[in-house]
Amino acid sequence: MPVDRPLRVVIAEDSVLLREGLSTLLTRFGHEVVASVGDATALAAAVGRDVPDIVVTDVRMPPGFSDEGLRAAVALREAHPRLSVLVLSQYVEQTYASELLDSGDGTGVGYLLKDRIGDVEEFMTALTGIAGGGTVVDPEVVRQLLRRRRDPLRRLSPREGEVLALMAEGRSNTAIARALMVSEAAVGKHIGNILTKLDLPPDEDDHRRVLAVVAFLRG
């Protein structure tokens, strides 16, 4: 469940403009930015010092501008299993994305692509949902990770693929039905088919359902 209290947030982003923009946005929604840093070393130090509820981090940061931020996120989750992490990136780093989704017990983690965030309210809902123990994964991240498991994916129909992507975003049956303009009964049938085809146990709980998708992606 999304948390309904102010969050303590650490932001890690090498772009000053993006860092300040995120800080302003989070503050406007009532959250406290306890640290705003520009590299992975400073991120680790800020988490140890300020004990945030959630970290929002980019993937590419100094000094190498490759995957330092994502590797730092994975390491922080290993050191602080209850720390929630939201990765914001312009691309999918497949190896460490899988490790991030596999970290801790698979809860309190998200991976969103910057260019695909089109609504501030949805972003804030994702943030508070992750801080509350949820799992939110951009559909494009899902698609790229699924490429490594093509055979099971081929079992899905195009509509089931759309439903799977929305499941990975943490959406309820009602929200999926609304997005695809179908009935909830049809969504329930699609989800049952997906879990069967991917050899995953069905579960009525939305959060456990997302974890089942994540388990498949990292398998």
Image: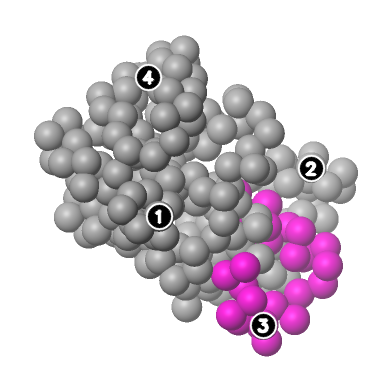
In terms of sequence position, does the residue under pointer 4 or pointer 2 come before the other?
4
* Mark 3 element type: helix
Residue 22 visible in rendering: no
In depth, the one of 40 and 186 nearer the eye is 40
Assess disc 4: are there few (<14), some (14-19) or many (≥20) residues with their C-alpha within 10 Å of its C-alpha.
Answer: some
Camera-near label (3 vs 2) is 3
Where residue 65 is drawn, which disc sits there? 1
Give the vertical position of 9 relative to 102 (above or below).
Answer: above
In terms of sequence position, does the residue under pointer 1 or pointer 3 come before the other?
1
Give the vertical position of 67 relative to 24 (above or below).
Answer: below
Find residue 145 and report its horizontal and vertical position in percent.
57, 70
Where residue 31 is drawn, which disc sits there? 4
Q: In 3D space, how far apart are the residues under numbered discs 2 and 1 (Cα atoms)? A: 36 Å
Q: In 3D space, how far apart are the residues under numbered discs 1 and 4 (Cα atoms)? A: 28 Å
Q: In 3D space, how far apart are the residues under numbered discs 4 and 2 (Cα atoms)? A: 29 Å
Residue drawn at point x = 75 percent, y = 81 percent: 154
Q: Give the range drawn in magenta.
A: 144-169
Find residue 163 and report its horizontal and vertical position in percent.
73, 57
* Mark 1 element type: loop
* Mark 2 element type: helix
* Mark 4 element type: loop
Q: Which residue lies furthest to the left in this view?
A: 49
